[in-house]
Each structure stands twice: as C-alpha cells, then as structure tokens.
Image: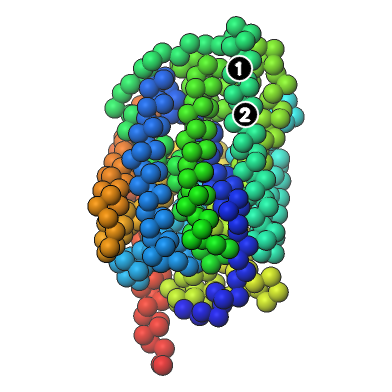
Amino acid sequence: MRAHELLAIPRTLGRWDLVLLKIVAIVNINNVPPVAVYGWASLGLWGLAFVMFFVPEAIAVLTLARRHPGEGGIYLWTRKAFGDGHGFLSGWCYWTNNLFYVPVLLVYMAGILAFAGGEARAADLVNQKAFVAAVSFGWLALIAVANIRGLAVGKWIQNIGGLGAFLSVGLVLAAAGAAWAGGAGVQAPGVAGASWEMPTSFAVMCNALVGIELASTMGDEIRNPVRDLGPAIAIAGVVSIASYLLVTGAVLTLVPVERLGVIQGVMQAVAAGAGAAHAGWIVVPLALGMGVATGGAASAWFAGSSRIPFVAGLTNALPGALGRLHPRWHSPHVALVTCAVLAAIFTALSLAGSSVAEAYQVLLKAAVVIQLIPFVYLFLALTKTSGVGIGARVAGGVGLTATLVSLVAAFLPTSDVASVALFETKMVIGVTGPPAFGWFLFKRAQRHELEVPT
C-alpha cells in the first residue's frame, strides 16, 4: 500500500459530521410502509432487528475500527482477518451494491421532489423521464464535483441531508398528530397480515439499519476516531431506531393497514391522512425534506463506497490508477469519477425500457443479499478477533445469525410473484453474477502481479 497517498488525505470529519453521516445513511423512512403491513406488531419486528443486527454491528464496528484503524473500513477489516481474497470479495460486494443503490436513491429523490409541485402534478412528473433524468443526473454531477473537491466540501451535503431526515420525521409525526386531532386517524390492528413473509420484512429491516460502518470506510479522514466514533454510533443508533418506530406508528394512524404495500410510500400516506385532516400544507415541505435527505444519503453512500476501489487500487487488487489522489484537493478523484460514471450508466439503464418496475423488485432483493455478504465477514471477524470479551463474541454470533436469516429470507418469494422458478433463477443470477465478476478481476490482478518482474 502506498502509505504516502493516505498521509496526504486531510482529516475533515468531526463528531457531528459523523453523527449526521450515519443518520442520513441509515434513516430512509420510505422503508417503513412495506414492512408496516403487520400493524403494531411491526414495531416488535423493528425492535428485534435493532437488537439482533444493529447492536452487534455497532459492537463489531467499534471493536474492529480500534483494532484496525484506517481507510477502507469493512474491506480492511476482512483483509486483516481472512486475507486478501476474502477482503476483496467483501469490499467488492459492498461497493457494487452501492453502484445499484445510489441510482435507486437518485431516481427515488426525483419521485419525492415531484410532490413539491403538488400531489396532483406528482404522478405526471414521475412519469416524465426527462424530469427524472434531469434531477438524477444533475444531483449525481453535483455530489461528484463536491466530493472531488474533498470531504471538507462534500460533507456538507451529507450534513444537510441529515437535517432533512430530522425534518422529514418531524413532519410525518405532525401529519399523524393533525389526523388524530381532526378525527381522521385510523386504528391499526395489533397484529395484521401475519404470515411466512414476516422473515422477508425482517431482512428488509436489517438492511435498513445498515450504515454505521460507512464512516469507517473513510477512517483516515476522521479527525479523532478514538474519541468520536463511539458517541456518534450511539447517537445515530438511538435516532435511527426512534425514527423508524415513530414513523411506523405515524403511518399506521394515517393509512389503513390494507392500503399499505411496496408501492405505497410515505408521501402518499401523508398526503392521504393530512388531506383528510385539512392539513395538506405538510405535503410540500415534507417532499422537500425527504428529497434533501435522500440526496444526502446518495452523497454519503457515493462518497463512502468510493473508498473501497480507492484502497483496492492502493493494494493492487484493482488497477493502481484508482488509488491516486487529486494533486490539489487530495481526494480519491479517480475512484470518485469511476463511481460517478458507473452510477450514471446504471441510472440510465434503470430509466430505459417498460419492465423496470418488475425487474426492480428482483434487483432490490438481490441487492439486499449482496449488501449483507460483507456483514457475514464482519461478524465472523469479530468472533475471530483475539483478546475480545465473551460479550463481543456473543454479539458476533447473534449478528451472524440475524444476517444469515436475512440472507435466506431474501430468497423467499412474496405472494405477488407469478413464477417462483423464474424469481429464484433471477435471484441466483443477480446474486452470483457481481461477486463472480469481482473474483475474476481479483484473480486476474493477482496473475498480472506475479507476471510483472520485480
């Protein structure tokens, strides 16, 4: 690894930068409606996911970040515990998943901002690909330029996005309060729609709580990681689970359970409930708040995941050019530009064709599996680390169990799947394809390195 490259990276992330980065990475309140279909029992599922996944993840991140500080985060930790090959596979899955996730956030951001023009115009704007493309590509260009200028500039997009997440949660709660005060609130059943599909929702919840490890991919860019990382994780954890629980309760009071589903979003729920309570003014500021939060999340995942190919370039696991720093701003500009180009390509592909909605569901579940593969390594690394206490090892075992359950649950077809065989085939291809391609690149790079005379 070229140490002088890492020494040139400025440390710009303070404690509150870390808090807001983690919050904007984790809190996506549109994760709520699809998993709120079980009524108040959904709150118990959120609590279970928090205890079984988030808490063990927090322990693992704190332990491994202190044992192995530096740029790369989960990629670095897996390399230290299991070697270069497993480290690359873990980092590759983490990176490639975000190449799909960032475009999802960009397109979703456009859909949310459409509501800022009023609910009546929202459907028309969302169906206009020119509008969605303009918002998506425009924002991608903005976050790419800001982060190439360095985290000292780029972090403000994440920070403002974190504040937007706070605003969004507050407005959803205000809409629910207005609905109850106006007599328009609905009574959600204690347990509704309980079925074998609940493990799938548990997997979605675990995936929704991913994000506290993101800042550690920029470990050499944190001012004082020993002092600030623990409090930032604690604050972000409390805020994140409270946000999901409160928004779940609010959505259940705004819309009857039978109207909740994958397509039904928070904006529609708030528009329906607030409209019935004559508080429709909430819709526009909520659209702006959620749009800013989603844009901040896109920037956070874009910036954080770009550090994986950057460090892989430094270690020659990927082309060495990815490990270069900008001569003026000292940012991993080659890795950032590469990620921006790939994200633009995937965004364009997502806007092409008429069967995007059908393919999107398979892609989303495949992304859940690919996202969780690095966490299998994370929890195994925690249990393998020497010198940790019994509590940390138990946490690693619990987290690993939750992750494995989530991985299996992602392959369970939902009731709206027409062909189970076709669904499973697409899932297998979608899950095995990206890791297999990454492994091919890694082995190719290894052979090239052996062939080059020293």
Residue at 31% in and 66% down: 81
Residue at 36% in and 85% down: 450
Q: Are marks 1 and 2 in contact (CB under 8 Å)?
A: no
Label 1 vs 2, first from the N-terminus: 2
Q: Is residue 331 left or right of residue 55?
A: right
Q: Position of residue 302 (x, y in %)?
A: 57, 55
Q: Is residue 306 visible?
A: no
Q: Residues within 10 Å of mark 2 (few under 14, many from 20)?
A: some
Q: Amino acid at mark 1?
A: Gly
Q: Position of residue 122 (x, y in %)?
A: 68, 28
159, above or below 320, in the image:
above
Cα separation, mark 1 vs mark 2, equals: 10 Å
Residue 10 falls in which quadrant of the image?
Answer: bottom right
Q: Position of residue 233 (x, y in %)?
A: 48, 48
Please name whichever residue, 125 or 86, is drawn nearer the observer in this view of the structure.
86
The C terminus: image quadrant = bottom left
Q: Secondary structure beneath disc 2?
A: helix
Q: Position of residue 219 (x, y in %)?
A: 51, 63
Q: Which mark is residue 177?
A: 1
Q: Which mark is residue 428?
A: none
Q: Is residue 253 left or right of residue 150?
A: left
373, above or below 76, in the image:
above
Hey, which residue is sitting farthest top in the picture?
183
100, above or below 405, in the image:
below
Residue highlighted by disc 2: 170
Residue at 30% in and 48% down: 395
Q: Is residue 194 visible?
A: yes
Q: Secondary structure beneath disc 1?
A: helix
